[in-house]
Image (spheres, grey):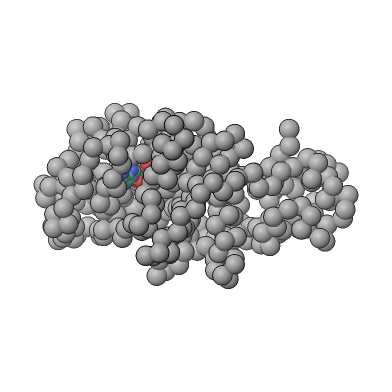
Amino acid sequence: MSVSLYDMTLPELELWLVSQGEAKYRAKQVFHWLYKRRAADVDDMTDLPQVLRDRLRATATMMTLREVARQVSTEDGTVKFLFALYDGSTIETVIMRHDYGISVCVSSQVGCKMGCKFCASTLGGLIRHLSAGEIMQQLLACQRLLDQRGERVSSVVLMGSGEPLENYEAVIRFIDTVTDPDGLQIGQRHITVSTVGLVPAIYRLADERRGITLAVSLHAADDETRSKMMPVNKAYDIASLLKACHYYYDRTGRRLSFEYALIRGHNDSLQDARKLADLLESLPCHVNLIPVNYVPERNLSRTPREQIKAFVTELQRLGVNATVRREMGADIAAACGQLRAEHAREQV
Ligand code: SAH
């Protein structure tokens, strides 16, 4: 079986090339072609000896993603891709423009098995993990599009479909290549990993003492409500999750981020806001309030605008650093899993 060049970190690429009888320094050259010059094909790597290029072509693969659909928001420039993988599975990737730069949201799994009641990505269950290279190819496809305008991805969020901490090794390998000064050179603090709250993996990540931002999907401030929305809460309740979050902060010094989707009548009362403020009291963090995105299969409605305002004001009054997430690409199917779900509906 051939290896994917995008699956290997620089040290892994060195080992692999040496095992093929090549000189170690060739790895850096290849790596630069992949990530700095964003070569589409081995033949673009013009300063490599022909023998090495032949070897790479025979034993390794490069881009395996195929673009199936692309939607561009005329309102805010958000771009959403639907990519097909070699096995026909599809995943979504999004480019978002902010005043502080351009971020890319990548998927880490095909589908998801976490079962959150408001989420479209989990509807068909987990199909499979993505490899590090498949996560990387999403980012590279976005960067290549931006290259046409001389623009650069400034931050990466692992907030597409899937639970990144369940696909731990691939995610770490991806991050190592993204942050490598010889790779895409995006700083660790510009990488955000979002998790449903897999407590043991949070400890593991904390112990690596990287500068990555951890975002935790909290969505409720008491166990009864959270367990109804997120089955994972039955395995790791809010108390154990917050303990892990404190540990993450202590080990890394990185402020945490919490996501809280406001769902009408479920988790959006002022009392919920007060409970949330109590929970987060001594933890340096930021709360991202997200008006829940409509998913046809899920019968949930958004908290009315006035109530969202009251909720965020109450949090702020209680000293919580909270903001309402700006909606991106509202005119396209940019919310989680929607393009993939639409595509799947068209196929039946
Ligand atoms: N599995 C990870 C990352 C993927 S989901 C996690 O759970 O964090 C990215 C974010 O989108 C999570 O906070 C998730 O809870 C949220 N999300 C999923 N469906 C949503 C919806 N319909 N409306 C608003 N947010 C949603």
Ligand 1 positioned in quadrant? top left
In the rendered image, the vertical position of residue 32 relative to residue 235, given as above or below: below
Q: How many marks?
A: 0
**Location of residue 52 in the rendering, given as x and y in whole percent from the top left corner:** 84, 50
In the rendered image, the vertical position of residue 171 relative to residue 36, given as above or below: above
Q: Please tell me which residue is depicted at 72% across the width and 47% down the height of the picture.
A: 13
Left or right: residue 111 compared with residue 229: right
Location of residue 221 (image quadrant): top left
Q: Please tell me which residue is depicted at 55% across the width and 57% down the height of the picture.
A: 142
Name the one closer to the observer, 170 or 62. Answer: 62
In the rendered image, the vertical position of residue 311 relative to residue 7, given as above or below: below
Task: Note whether residue 21 is visible.
Answer: yes
**Location of residue 310 in the rendering, given as x and y in whole percent from the top left corner:** 13, 57
Name the one closer to the observer, 36 or 75. Answer: 75
Left or right: residue 345 compared with residue 35: left
**Location of residue 255 in the rendering, given as x and y in whole percent from the top left corner:** 36, 56
